[in-house]
Structures are given as C-alpha cells and as structure tokens.
Image (cartoon, rainbow, N blue to C red):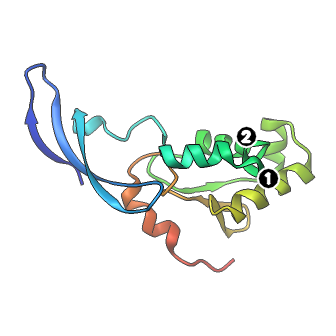
Amino acid sequence: MIQKIETGKRGKTFAKQQAIDGYTGELHEILLIGNPEEFDRNFTKVFHAFTEALIEDNEIALGPIKLLFWIMKELETGSIEFYMHYSIIKEELSVSRDTYYRWLRVLTKKGLIKKVRPNIYQLNPACIVKGKGHTLLDEFRQNTEI
C-alpha cells in the first residue's frame, strides 16, 4: 500500500511503499517520487538481481529469454496469469514446436513461470511484475493442481 508523505516544491509527491527484493524475497520500505496514482502503471518491473541472474545463466540467455520477454509484453497489468499456446508463439517468435517446449521447460524449471491449467501459466512476481507485485506474490506461491 502506498502511503503519501508530502508534496515537494515542484509538485512531486513523495510516498513510501513496501517492495519485494527480487534477490532475497524480503519486503523493504522504499521511497517513491511522483504521483502515487501513476505508480505501477504501463510498465513492467524487472528486478536488478534477477536481471543479472538471467544474463549470467546461459540456459536462459541463449533462447528462453525471448519467450520470457514475450510473456512480459503480453501480461496484463495487475495479473500474473496468462494464456500461452504453441500456435501463438510459433507466429510471434517463429520457433519450432521443439524449441517452444524446451524454452517452456527451462522457464518452469528455473521457477520463472508455473503451469496452473492447460495453456494457463503464472509469472513469478518476485522476479518480474506488471503492476503491484507485493499483492501478487502470494497468488504465485499457492500450490495448484494441474
């Protein structure tokens, strides 16, 4: 929850919010500058420690990262759940069926996404968030039967 603190000389609002550390998963209080109503809109947050880990992991950096970026682009604000099927990825990323399923296995094994139902997945909000991540992390952590 964002708590407004004060308004500065130039009309900027200073506020505090709790944020999830992408590396440790711990909650920290951070200072936000801007209009609280505009925070967490129209952009995707990718945590720094997570980004470094992606770049250093050859298993992800050599292909599956393309699928991960597609997921980030398609994800709706405030949601971690998305629909994904090979026929869509084939058109969007021009990859073979084998490549799609290999990338999917890597992203799942690394804990970046998880399958909740056939063709329905969740993106791990401790790593990547489109919207307010601290409210979505519990949803991802819930055990789901396929």
Find the residue positioned furthest to the top: 10
Q: Position of residue 28 (x, y in %)?
A: 29, 56
For this orientation, the residue located farthest to the front is 56
Q: State which quarter of the image contains the C terminus.
A: bottom right
Q: Position of residue 144 (x, y in %)?
A: 60, 77
| Structural crowding at the residue carrying mark 1, measured as other residues with C-alpha within 10 Å and reported as few (<14), some (14–19) or many (≥20) | many
Neighbor class of circle 2 (other Cα within 10 Å; few <14, some 14-19, many 20+) is some
Marks 1 and 2, how far apart in space?
A: 9 Å
Q: Which residue is mark 2?
A: 66
Q: Nearer the viewer, residue 52 or 87?
A: 52
With respect to residue 145, does 8 lie above or below?
above
Counting from the top left corner in percent of width and height, residue 90 is at 85, 42
- Which amino acid type is shown beneath numbered disc 1? Trp
Identify the mark at residue 103; answer none if there is no mark: 1
The amino acid on which the numbered mark 2 sits, given as a three-letter code, is Lys
User: Left or right: 33 with respect to 96?
Assistant: left
Q: Nearer the viewer, residue 49 or 46?
A: 49
User: Which secondary structure lies at badge 1?
Assistant: helix
Checking the image for residue 70, the label placed there is none
Asked if residue 84 is positioned above or below residue 88 in the image, the reply reads below
Q: Are marks 1 and 2 in contact (CB under 8 Å)?
A: yes
- Tag 2's secondary structure? helix
Q: Is residue 87 left or right of residue 146?
A: right
Q: Is residue 1 above or below residue 118?
A: above
Instruction: Please identify the quarter of the rendering in which residue 34 is found.
Output: top left
Provide residue 48's location: percent of width, then percent of height: 49, 43
Q: Residue at x 52, y 66 (%)?
A: 140
Residue at 70% of width from left, 49% of height from top?
57
Side of 50 relative to 39 (left or right): right
